[in-house]
Image (cartoon, coloured by chain):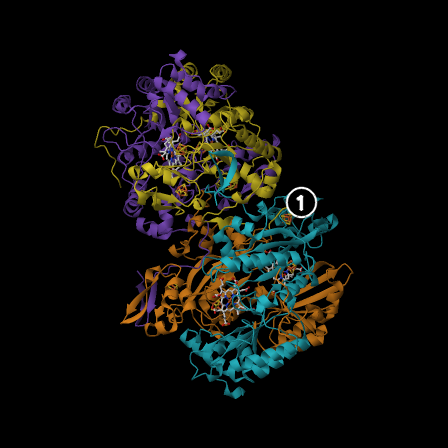
Chain colours: A cyan, B purple, C yellow, D orange
Amino acid sequence: MADKLPPTPKLDELEKGPWPSFVSEIKMAAKSSLASQDLLGLLERSYNEKIGHWKHGGIVGVLGYGGGVIGRYCDLPAEFPNVSHFHTVRVNQPAGWYYKTDALRKICDIWEKRGSGLTNMHGSTGDIILLGTRTDELEPIFAELTAIGFDLGGSGSDVRTPSCCLGKSRCEWACYDTMALTHDLTQSFQDELHRPAFPYKFKFKMSGCPNDCVASVARADISIIGTWRDNIRVNQDAVLEYTKNGLNIQKEVIAFCPGKCMEWDGKQLDIDNSTCRRCMHCINVMPKALRPGKDTGATVLIGSKAPIIEGALLSSVLIPFWKPVAPYTDLKDLMGRIWEIWCEEGKNRERIGEFIQRMGMGNFLETIGVEPIPEMVAHPRENPYVFYEEYLVEDDEEEGQDKN
Amino acid sequence: MADKLPPTPKLDELEKGPWPSFVSEIKMAAKSSLASQDLLGLLERSYNEKIGHWKHGGIVGVLGYGGGVIGRYCDLPAEFPNVSHFHTVRVNQPAGWYYKTDALRKICDIWEKRGSGLTNMHGSTGDIILLGTRTDELEPIFAELTAIGFDLGGSGSDVRTPSCCLGKSRCEWACYDTMALTHDLTQSFQDELHRPAFPYKFKFKMSGCPNDCVASVARADISIIGTWRDNIRVNQDAVLEYTKNGLNIQKEVIAFCPGKCMEWDGKQLDIDNSTCRRCMHCINVMPKALRPGKDTGATVLIGSKAPIIEGALLSSVLIPFWKPVAPYTDLKDLMGRIWEIWCEEGKNRERIGEFIQRMGMGNFLETIGVEPIPEMVAHPRENPYVFYEEYLVEDDEEEGQDKN
Amino acid sequence: MPEPTRKRVTDIGPPHYEQFLPPAIKENYGKWLYHEFVKPGVLMHVSESGAKLFTVRAGGSRLMSIQKIRMICDLADKYCGGYLRFTSRHNIEFMFTDPTQIDPLIADLAKIGHPVGGTGRSITSIVHTQGWVHCHSAATDASGIVKSVMDGVIEHFTHSDLPAKCRIALACCLNMCGAVHCSDIAILGIHRRPPKIDHANLKKTCEIPNVSASCPTAAIRPGTVDGMPSVVVEEDRCMFCANCYTVCPSMKLNDPLNDGVSIWVGGKVSNARHEPMFSKLAIPYLPNNPPRWPEVTDAIINIINVWKGHARKNERLGEWIERIGWPRFFQMTGIQFEKLHIDDFKHAGLTFKRSAHLMF
Amino acid sequence: MPEPTRKRVTDIGPPHYEQFLPPAIKENYGKWLYHEFVKPGVLMHVSESGAKLFTVRAGGSRLMSIQKIRMICDLADKYCGGYLRFTSRHNIEFMFTDPTQIDPLIADLAKIGHPVGGTGRSITSIVHTQGWVHCHSAATDASGIVKSVMDGVIEHFTHSDLPAKCRIALACCLNMCGAVHCSDIAILGIHRRPPKIDHANLKKTCEIPNVSASCPTAAIRPGTVDGMPSVVVEEDRCMFCANCYTVCPSMKLNDPLNDGVSIWVGGKVSNARHEPMFSKLAIPYLPNNPPRWPEVTDAIINIINVWKGHARKNERLGEWIERIGWPRFFQMTGIQFEKLHIDDFKHAGLTFKRSAHLMF
Ligand code: SRM
Ligand code: SRM
Ligand code: SRM
Ligand code: SRM
Ligand code: SF4
Ligand code: SF4
Ligand code: SF4
Ligand code: SF4
Ligand code: SF4
Ligand code: SF4
Ligand code: SF4
Ligand code: SF4
């Protein structure tokens, strides 16, 4: 089929240069896929016209699932009939994105037969993205995927596919088992993942330490970031070794310590752990000399999202220190309480972070039964508009009266 | 009259202790003032009842002035007839709060005759506050005050009495002549000060250096804070001297430098002036060794205020570096442009800082003819909701079209 | 530019400051080179010319009688050739060139009850407002608390013994006339009971639409009460700003049972080291307990002691808290953190802790 | 708690990761002690057991054909016993215990066009989204810009030669699927023309009240156009969020003449040193210039070079800018500061410079 490739002078420019070319990928796929051939033509057209040629997707999917497929239709179906439908299938990746080649090959085989042959490894939420197929292929694809042990990920107003850094599998800093937690939550929340019933999407991301290698703090409704409570473990000899090899501790480490809690006298590195912020910087610079403490766990944060529509949010502290112990019942219970109030009072398309801001964090905590603590705020309020909730009345000076 | 003082067991408690007692002051005044006697009784009553006994003030003042007097009436006139009227007179202080005793004594004489004999030296805006008199005394007081060279300060929706730190008169750090500027502005804006015609109050405060000893950044619609553009003047010998006398430069100076721009090798203090933030800290700690540069001037900031009602504001940079040269025409011109748009489009009781936020700083700058520069912001916008103002249309690709 | 206005002879403005400057200051105006602290409350400024000026700073009770002003004038005549000044925080400064005059002046000041201090790493006078002495809005008295607190912390006025300057301010209502919102420690008069409406008089004294419009949370709406046109307040929504009372005397916020003060900490104004900062809520409510407000005084002394005991040299209260973190501030001071500490006004979300920078 | 759901056989969830872990990882799971950079793109992790694991990281084009995946599988079979993984930024990682395999693998990767790098103080793959390849919302293409930029900065992928990590991300519209809002450098597809309304079809395709309600600035109101019920947009108020288009296909924002990209800088996600930060607007508009978007590539290379030339070791782009100040950033990069840089959304006032901390 290769000789049938449409002329793509613009796109061809993107086959030049050292970085792997997605155009070459589409061309490779086009060898065995008419859809990919048409995609080439359509994309060349977009490159000429400086505009996309896709329409709003309708609701397409597999039986009994409310998510996992993004419907997509081309606005030039007559000219590009093979991409008139071009739906993507989101396949839930294994935690940590580890694969055996046989599993991957099986996915490729399905996708060669039933789709464009194009993928994203992976989408930015973390799924395997199978890019472009027709409505009538969806059921067969789903059946074949489950047969090889894979299932669909989330889309729509549901729990989205959780993802995590590789954690304890290959990182010395993992303060809890991110992959175990991710797998467990994904399995526990299959119903919430496949049957959208929330006001909007809800994402989980798990990072093993404050370096946050899955960017959880910026793009997850629940961000679980590993940390420790006790002291940084210091190997003074190894510290000295680093300095001998040219590390300037004062300039490269201490000057950047946000806790201002380190001192170096040329021989001994002193850390005042009581004001260490667990930022990881010193450990990052001297991985052979410093290690997180032994009393490890995680900080649970809530509410980050992209800007649409009230402005972007980072997640904020919900539980400063949580000990993740399977089956994580405490966390799941908490999720239940959070979802309950959000489903009840959340507005359509209102993410949990926006919801908390609208109802007030104090009120939110009250509803979900969590004590307010100073770790949850950067600082207490600056404005004096306090909603005092009780007041005394003259008749009965001794008794408080609830304003509500 | 002293024997006529009402019993004040509660207030008497406040005559104990080492700090000067305002109760003793009221008692002293009460020796020659019936109003102060009644004030004692009324205040004792407030101390017993835990509530004030003053009513909203009506509009009282002197002929032709819209401000300068705060009307005040007691809600128990029958019991305390001598404070049934208890208006305060705001007298514009001389810049820097310097006095000769003869001038002060003359004020005391007027106030002995025509008021309670109580004052605030000074009010928090900066005025001499003459505390408590009757409506019919206002005109005579005003006449006598002007006769000894004093005039009223501001109140209501006008320019409020400007104030300043003592600047060059006694401080080695003053980067411009705060008292000269304050006096000049006060004189130039007499009409704006005495005849309220703005949407709300408008305050000026002048500090000679970034230490900001009149707290201008927190409570002035225009805050003028001295600074310098060139290099901090360093006397290395004097630096050494400080260290010999026990100063730990690394811990007490460098660790606090917000510009992270200092280095000390035990002999020489190096400052990278290009990233010095003119914070004053190092100079404050070593006044004999370090001095502001020679190319001095001021930063003009705009918009601070107390929280009512949209929340407190600090002033923000309007002119990063301004050379104050009498008669300061450039600044006064700018004020004219600012007041023009504010009077035209500002809402009632909307301070300039709130106004700028409502109309957008970019739009505000455009109206007053000031270029937007990055010094005005802590950082550029984080949210992507940009009001692009022009777009191209198909017919005429070459020409921009103004959205407005 | 707006033309200088001289249309009426009235607008003479304040006297020119020059006539009030002591000769030593006139001569060295703009020529000062450096200063030293001679002792607490006493500064020495040295000029390029070599001239030395000594300043003695006396604590002022801002509310002063003309009798006291005259006594102070007597001292200024005696020691300073008839010149004196007041500071931006209402203290009184005596300036002269002869250092042997320092101690006699201090002794004379003591006689009329004025301590000397407030310089360097100290507490200086409390900026404050009118309270029950003059203002209709006051949720607490000003001068009484100020006197009580200053009595309690006077050692830090007369000794320069703190990690850094500590600026205390008091405002008797949310209008915050003292601009207390950027103080190391702020004492703020607060109401806690929604407006008690004088339905009988409201229609007479105020415009109903203005009253409803005045409420920033839209808690007020027009309504008929006991057959009279008036307004109704949805009490849940009241945040006690008293804006309605400012526009209408029939919306009384003052209430003896519920008024009191809140304590705010960690603000600053200077640009030294850290940029200026707002104060943050430390204690949401302490009762009005005249004449000496012991709860307020104790709370402030406690905060100062904890700060003094733990901060590094040069760390203002807010800078210290920023380094050690708010959780530890609450823990060390024993102040209870509660829901009310969490912001819920319009920028609330920006005060949430949006990182994993935590201390345990 | 929500019960784990197993009601339908369908919900099997993803395969358990354990079956996909290479033996060396299974054995040392949770036992890793430290790591070293062998060379750019190659990590060595050392376990408590003394075991060493080598990782070779290959740059991925996220958009991959099954053909390429199979080639990669071939390499994983050849070198890694059939195991491999992908990273959170879409790179491909090969892990094995025998260091002599490093160079042959790298050579084999080169043959199929995949460079090795992205570790340490480098630029790694650009997180991005769909663009014209798949999304109806796209204001620009994703893969084309990403390819062009990566070609331009590849030396910083293959060499660990920067002051710190530099994370670039691209989103093709304000929905920001890549969560680009916390990137060192973000490339954002933007619209600049208010919706072109398809009045003929609007009533058929959309609910008019929903369309008006969708606009956060209330720019849209119902109206009759050419006799047809439709909506009218007050163009001044449009901030190009495309929320109306999300709810209604007849409100088209895509526009070839005006769409393009903006560049944002200085964000970060890690807690290392500075708390996480949002990216800030650097360049409000660059044109869509396919196929290689030279303006975008040049702008990014310029920013990186200036940062690389001036930052201290360990300073992420945003940390460096915070130290030197935004005025100098604009000056050094030659980027023009303009009105559009100044925030005018709801927290705008908090972005004004509210201190005298200035650098000249
Ligand atoms: C495929 C993917 C982009 C990619 O190429 O990687 C994607 C694609 C779309 N996203 Fe997304 N989002 C994808 C990850 C994200 C992320 C990143 C993440 O999950 O970590 C975000 C930012 C984080 C967040 O959730 O806030 C994201 C924030 C959005 C938003 C804005 C949501 C908000 O609350 O601000 C929308 C708009 C919406 O939901 O209406 C959106 C909407 C969309 C839609 C469904 C467009 C639409 O309005 O219907 C896109 C379909 C494109 C297509 O045709 O394929 N997408 N979207 C990502 C999912 C892949 C996967 O499953 O692995
Ligand atoms: C006398 C004084 C307090 C004092 O004891 O020092 C004072 C007293 C009053 N202020 Fe003030 N303000 C005084 C300085 C301030 C300051 C501080 C400053 O000017 O540096 C502020 C904060 C800075 C600012 O302007 O934002 C201040 C912010 C207010 C506000 C809130 C304004 C705002 O925009 O947030 C009000 C409420 C109002 O204007 O309706 C207010 C209103 C009032 C009124 C007029 C009460 C009212 O609502 O009618 C008070 C009259 C009290 C009385 O009966 O004597 N006063 N007021 C100060 C003036 C003395 C002088 O002229 O020297
Ligand atoms: C007299 C006065 C100015 C005036 O025109 O009246 C003044 C005078 C001096 N100030 Fe001030 N400041 C005065 C109010 C202020 C204020 C305003 C306020 O408190 O409301 C501030 C801002 C406070 C804040 O940040 O909240 C202020 C922040 C400073 C600073 C910065 C302190 C810091 O570390 O943040 C210095 C530098 C220093 O002390 O190291 C300073 C330094 C000085 C010096 C050393 C300047 C000099 O070289 O002469 C003067 C003696 C300081 C001392 O007493 O320790 N002055 N100073 C004011 C005395 C008030 C009083 O009676 O106590
Ligand atoms: C493989 C991966 C995790 C995964 O599960 O896939 C990973 C792995 C490692 N990261 Fe990471 N990080 C990975 C994405 C991230 C991300 C997420 C992102 O970029 O979207 C971040 C947050 C970035 C941000 O702040 O914007 C991230 C921030 C860090 C940091 C903190 C860097 C900083 O100074 O801010 C470190 C520590 C360091 O490098 O010194 C780190 C350190 C590490 C270490 C050294 C951890 C270890 O001991 O093994 C790993 C090798 C680092 C390297 O390549 O230099 N990793 N790392 C991700 C590789 C992405 C890629 O293909 O390039
Ligand atoms: S987040 Fe921490 S534990 Fe996870 S991979 Fe990154 S550095 Fe390792
Ligand atoms: S982890 Fe961060 S805060 Fe803690 S000591 Fe190291 S550099 Fe400092
Ligand atoms: S603001 Fe500066 S110039 Fe003015 S008195 Fe204070 S330290 Fe001196
Ligand atoms: S003035 Fe401040 S920023 Fe500048 S060098 Fe001194 S301490 Fe650093
Ligand atoms: S703070 Fe409030 S009560 Fe006190 S003087 Fe000002 S307006 Fe009056
Ligand atoms: S006090 Fe403020 S919030 Fe309460 S009713 Fe009055 S105006 Fe509304
Ligand atoms: S960023 Fe916008 S255009 Fe790009 S994939 Fe997401 S929704 Fe579509
Ligand atoms: S793009 Fe956004 S701002 Fe513009 S009309 Fe549509 S919804 Fe309103």
- Above or below, comparing residue B360 to residue B172 in the picture: below
Look at the picture and state if D341 lies above or below A147. above
Is D134 displayed left or right of D29 in the figure?
left
- Asked whether residue C71 is in view, the answer is yes
Where residue C39 sits, quadrant-wise, is top right
Question: How far from the left and from the top, in percent, is residue A397?
Answer: 50, 33
In this view, the residue in front, B120 or A360, is A360
Report in which chain the residue with disc 1 lies: A
Is label 1 within 8 A of ligand 6 (CB to nearest ligand atom)?
Answer: yes
**Which sits in the foreground, A59 or A298?**
A59
Q: Nearer the viewer, residue B40 or A54?
A: B40
**Nearer to me, B397 or A163:** A163
Position of D44 compared to B287: left or right? right
Q: Which quarter of the figure is the N terminus of chain A placed in?
A: bottom right
* Secondary structure of the residue carrying numbered label 1: helix
Camera sees residue B295: no
Q: Position of residue C287 (x, y in %)?
A: 51, 32
Q: Residue C140, position in %: x, y?
A: 45, 31
Give amino acid for label 1: Asn
Q: Residue furthest right?
A: D49
Quickly name the residue at label 1: A273
Task: Count the marks.
Answer: 1
